[in-house]
Image (cartoon, helix red, strand yellow):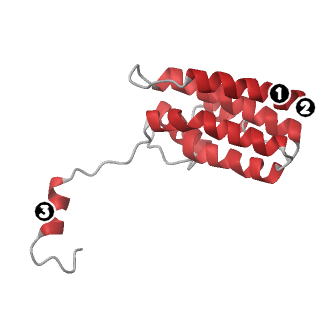
Amino acid sequence: MILLDKEQRLQSVIDKTPAVFPYPGYQWIEDRFWTWVHYALLKIGRGEYMEAYDFSGFLRMTVFGPLLHIKNGNLPQGVRKVETELQPDDFRALQSTLPAYDKASLLAGLRNAVELYRHLRTVLFDSSVELKTETEKRVMQYFEEIEKS
């Protein structure tokens, strides 16, 4: 209910604007994903495991939950109701991104996150999304360095 709109400006905007659930921008995600992976690797490499652990939750909420919901024909509501609204294989893939609090598990969870993202972008993204392949290549080289250290 609008309490004060004497010139009907707000009501006019409301009337002319279709109500649609906000979907994530695939290009927006692609433009940031590899930087986010690099950030997590930096934290793991520095021994900042709690930050890396929490950051894996950010990726699930911002990237994987919404994309998996879209893949499964649902509204992209983060990780809300993923236990009941995703196909079992998709839910298991999401679970594989959950790390324990140690370096090996954090790296394994992040590796699984990368593989899940690569899968989702092939399923969902069309040719209009410009993949950041050079950034991906360099981040994955850094990933190997962190795994070896």
Amino acid under disc 3: Ser
Residue position for label 3: 12
Task: Give percent across and percent down for residue 134.
Answer: 59, 21
Q: Is 147 or 67 nearer to us in this picture?
A: 147
Mark 2 crowd level (few <14, some 14–19, many ≥20, 10 Å Cα): few
**3D distance between C-alphas at marks 1 and 3:** 57 Å
Residue position for label 2: 149
**3D distance between C-alphas at marks 3 and 2:** 60 Å
Apparent side of residue 128 relative to residue 2 in the rendered image (left or right)? right
Residue ID at (49%, 48%): 77
Residue ID at (58%, 31%): 87
Task: Give percent across and percent down for residue 51.
Answer: 76, 52
Q: Is 28 or 86 nearer to us in this picture?
A: 28
**3D distance between C-alphas at marks 2 and 1:** 6 Å
Q: Is 134 or 18 nearer to us in this picture?
A: 134
Q: Is residue 98 visible?
A: no
| Circles 1, 3 touching at the beta carbon (< 8 Å) | no
Q: Of callouts 1 and 3, which one flags the residue occurring earlier in the amino acid sequence?
A: 3
Amino acid under disc 2: Ser
Residue position for label 1: 145
- In this rendering, the answer to whether 19 lies above or below 60 is below
